[in-house]
Amino acid sequence: MQRNSTKMLKIYIIFLLLILIYLCSFNILNLINNSPQEIIPSNRTLGFDHIYVIGLDYRKDRREIMNKQISYLNLDAEYFNAVSKYDKILHKFTNANPKLTVGQRACYVSHYLIYQTIIEEGFNSVLILEDDVDFEANITDIMADIHQNLPESWDTLHIGHCYEIIGQPVGSSSFPNKLYQAVEPQCSHAYAVSNSGVHKLLKSIDPMNALGPIDYELSIRVKSKEIISYSIHPQPIIQWKEGNPSDVASTSHYPFSLTNSTMNLLGLINANKYPGEWM
């Protein structure tokens, strides 16, 4: 009887040890899979491989404001010097659509060059920002949630836009900012492109044969379903225009707002609702 009790006790102890080993192994693997080395870079680039901020190198005013926001939000972003309307490279595109202003041609070429750079660098996904944007203060949490719902196959994701029609909802979210199928997004101040999306765009757009400004080119390809595109409503990244003259187009005011503006929190503007312009 005592021998059987001892045997059962040994079996029980071995069983507990096996459970303990399993739990320890599971926790170690979980820590490895969710280590700061894996999480932090993804959060700092909002779930994309890279963030490019397009801006003219002489617009120090914009860059100073962007730097403050990037630092506050703990983002990792690289500046991409935009083509100026005074840049000699535009001479190559003198036969481009005459209806485009010089500034619009410069903007078009800037985005086209960044597409080429994305291919050269081998990025799978890149967030492209223009240097006059304001963020929801919880943009990192918003984008983490969006990525949970974003289908595996996508070409462009319009995080910031203007006058976009709300399409069919995609997935579910506990945040007010939800994912939808894009319909006809306008403006190019905050959108992401996948590697497949960049290849499609480079094959179909050409600065020498531009149909319109770059955001129009993107919009018609989304509308025709030439590219697989999604948008976020309400948009968590908007353009700020108060005392911020455009280098691209004349002003045509429109009001957009954020729930919790980063620029407000930093004391960079007096309100989170301000006039803007259609780039």
Image (cartoon, rainbow, N blue to C red):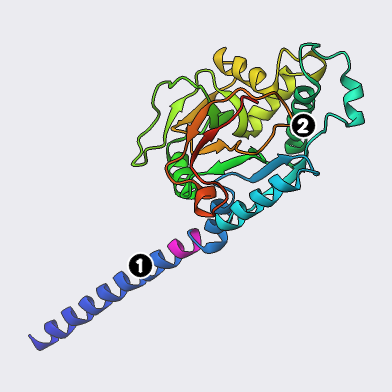
Label of residue 110 in the image: 2
Residue 80 sits above or below residue 38 on the image:
above
Q: Secondary structure at mark 1?
A: helix
Quick check: can you spot residue 125?
A: no
Q: Position of residue 134 (x, y in %)?
A: 56, 42
Q: Is residue 190 above or below residue 184?
A: below
In the foreground, 91 or 3: 91
Instruction: Specify whether 217 is left or right of 178.
Output: right
- Label 1 crowding class (10 Å Cα cut-off): few <14, some 14-19, many 20+? few
Question: Relative to 187, is 257 on the left or the right?
Answer: left
User: In the depicted view, which residue is nearer to us: 174 or 266?
Assistant: 266
Please tell me whether residue 32 belongs to the stretch shown in magenta. yes
Q: Identify the residue under disc 1.
A: 22
Secondary-structure class at tag 2:
helix
Amino acid type at mark 2: Ser
The quadrant of the rendering that contains the C terminus is: top right
Tell me the residue at 92%/30% (across/down).
88
Kindly tell me whether residue 105 is visible in this rendering: yes
Quarter of the figure with residue 25:
bottom left
Quarter of image, res 175: top left
Q: CA distance from mark 1 to mark 2?
A: 54 Å
**Range shown magenta:** 29-33
Most distant residue in the bottom direction: 2
Could you tell me residue 18's position as x and y percent? 31, 71
- Label 1–label 2 contact, CB within 8 A: no
Q: Which mark is residue 7?
A: none
Query: What secondary structure is the magenta-colored segment mainly?
Result: helix
Which quadrant of the figure contains the N terminus? Answer: bottom left
Q: Position of residue 80 (x, y in %)?
A: 76, 42
Of residue 246 and residue 201, the one placed in the foreground of this image is 246
Answer whether residue 192 is magenta in the image: no
